[in-house]
Amino acid sequence: MSTSIELYFDRGTDLDLERKINGKGYVIRLMSSVVFLGKEGWIGPYSAIVDTGAHISVIPRRIWSSSDTTVLSDHSMSGIVPIDVCSIPVLVGEIDAMLIDERSHTKKIRMVSYFALTDEIPLIIGFKTLLEEFEVCFNYKADTARITSVD
């Protein structure tokens, strides 16, 4: 039996870029709703960026500190510029989650994640977990996006 969860596109404007280059500040993000296993049941839902360029999920402190987690190590996270001055400290750990939509939810998935030590970072679902667990299909022009699991 397969389960399909609808993802969605968030459309917005990068105001700083728009001021600099009129008409070019349009931003498109692939998004999902997600719940996490808390210390006393499921918490959420939260809106998460599905980041096709992120190999690992990034969870803000307000979420992982209320969740049933396993911390494995301390670490640092960097983006495009892999130098120390451009990195932030994180913990590496495991957290249980389910992606959800209005009709259904995925199976519980255990995600290796970076636990941010701040809330000043967005909730990001890394692509590695999605690629390992689901078929991922998205077509912006047709306004369709989904993940499908075969249970």
Image: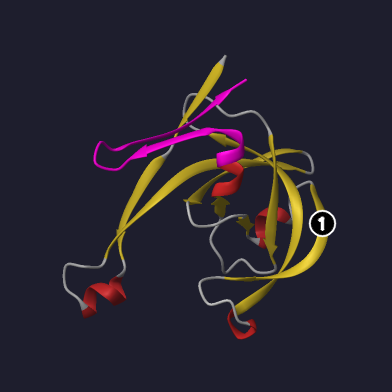
**Secondary structure at numbered mark 1:** strand
Q: Residue at x 61, y 85 (%)?
A: 85
The N terminus lies in which quarter of the figure?
top right
Q: Which residue is mark 1?
A: 71
Name the kind of residue labelled 1 in the image. Answer: Val
Q: Position of residue 27 (x, y in %)?
A: 31, 60
Chain part drawn in magenta: 131-151
Q: Is residue 3 above or below residue 122?
A: above
Q: Is residue 142 magenta?
A: yes
Q: Quadrant of residue 24?
A: bottom left
Looking at the image, residue 131 sits to the left or right of residue 117; the answer is: left
Q: Position of residue 37 (x, y in %)?
A: 72, 40
Q: Is residue 97 magenta?
A: no
Q: Is residue 25 above or below residue 82?
A: above
* Color encoding of the figure: secondary structure
Q: Quadrant of residue 76?
A: bottom right
The C terminus lies in which quarter of the figure?
top right
Judge by depth and name the residue closer to the eye, 31 or 139. 139
Q: Position of residue 6 (x, y in %)?
A: 43, 32
Q: Residue at x 68, y 54 (%)?
A: 113
Which residue is the extreme one toward the left? Answer: 22
Looking at the image, residue 129 sits to the left or right of residue 9; the answer is: right
Looking at the image, residue 7 sits to the left or right of residue 72; the answer is: left
Q: Position of residue 96 (x, y in %)?
A: 71, 41
Q: Residue at x 56, y 56 (%)?
A: 123
